[in-house]
Image (cartoon, rainbow, N blue to C red):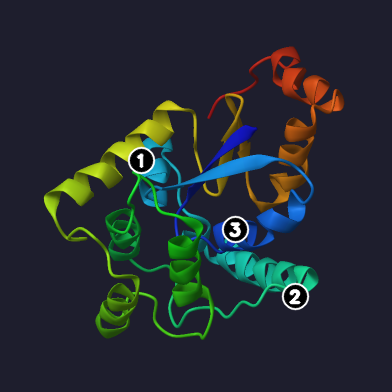
Amino acid sequence: MKRIDFYLDFISPYAYLAFAQLPRALEGLSYEVVYRPVLFAGLLKHHGQLGPAEILPKRDWTYRQVAWQAAAHGIALDMPAAHPFNPLGLLRLALACARLGTPNRHVCEQIFRHVWQGGAAADDAARLANLSARLAPTRDAAGDAVKQELKAATEAAIAAGLFGVPSFVVDGRVFWGFDALPMLRAQLEGDARLEAAWAAPASVAQGTRR
């Protein structure tokens, strides 16, 4: 059975779409998923990038495409009252609920729904307190141990070659984005066509640098 490490940040609408679509995208295959919350902003900072919502025209396109993709795939989605927002409380809550080192699908699903269904403010303190009460974490989400775990998880993701979310790692290969789900399935199925795609970067010389 293959193991998929699913790196996510609840701030990302594409991570939400990928989370919702994953069971359908991999239907009929044998696999296990390990959900790994990381700070998307930490990946962006490391690679010197801005987030999609920090570039105004790209922000507008992102929300339009996300709405379209959700409707096309039958995924319930409402934009939160404000975006982007500070996701640290949600990421730490997920880790605080982890009983075996990483949160289970139920915990991640409840947090994703908190953000992407209903249209309320994702970082509202009262809503976050209510969500925490429902999930009943076994550890203090605001404690130093959980904070360090999130930092270490983000650093480990960077070391593994990640640059964005959602990212899926299987067999040492990184698959990035909601639209990478067909490639992820191909990897699990052992599709030989994927080998040519994986070798493609080696044939392209580094061009002009800015």
Residue at (42% x, 44% y) in the render: 44
Q: Amino acid at mark 1?
A: Thr
Q: Secondary structure at mark 1?
A: helix
Location of residue 176 with respect to 206 vertically, above or below: below
Q: Which residue is mark 3?
A: 19
Tell me the crowding category of disc 2: few under 14, some 14 to 19, or many 20 or more residues within 10 angstroms, Cα based: few
Residue 11 visible somewhere in the drawing: no
- Report if the CB atoms under discs 2 and 1 are less than 8 Å apart: no
Location of residue 153 with respect to 205 vertically, above or below: below
Location of residue 48 with respect to 138 vertically, above or below: above
Q: Which residue is mark 1?
A: 154
- Chain-order first, disc 3 or disc 1: 3
Real-space Cα separation, disc 2 to disc 3, in angstroms: 15 Å
Which of these two is toward me, 206 or 88?
88
Q: Position of residue 158 (x, y in %)?
A: 41, 32
Image quadrant in which you'd find residue 87: bottom left
Q: Position of residue 29 (x, y in %)?
A: 75, 43
Q: Amino acid at mark 2?
A: Ala
- Chain-order first, disc 2 or disc 3: 3
Q: Position of residue 25 (x, y in %)?
A: 75, 52
Tell me the crowding category of disc 1: few under 14, some 14 to 19, or many 20 or more residues within 10 angstroms, Cα based: many
- Chain-order first, disc 2 or disc 1: 2
Residue at (44% x, 76% y) in the render: 114
Q: Which residue is mark 2?
A: 71
Residue 128 placement, left or right of 158: left
- Report if the CB atoms under discs 3 and 1 are less than 8 Å apart: no
| Quadrant that contains the N terminus | top right
Q: How many marks?
A: 3
Which of these two is toward me, 22 or 179?
22
Q: Position of residue 139 (x, y in %)?
A: 20, 58
Q: Secondary structure at mark 3?
A: helix
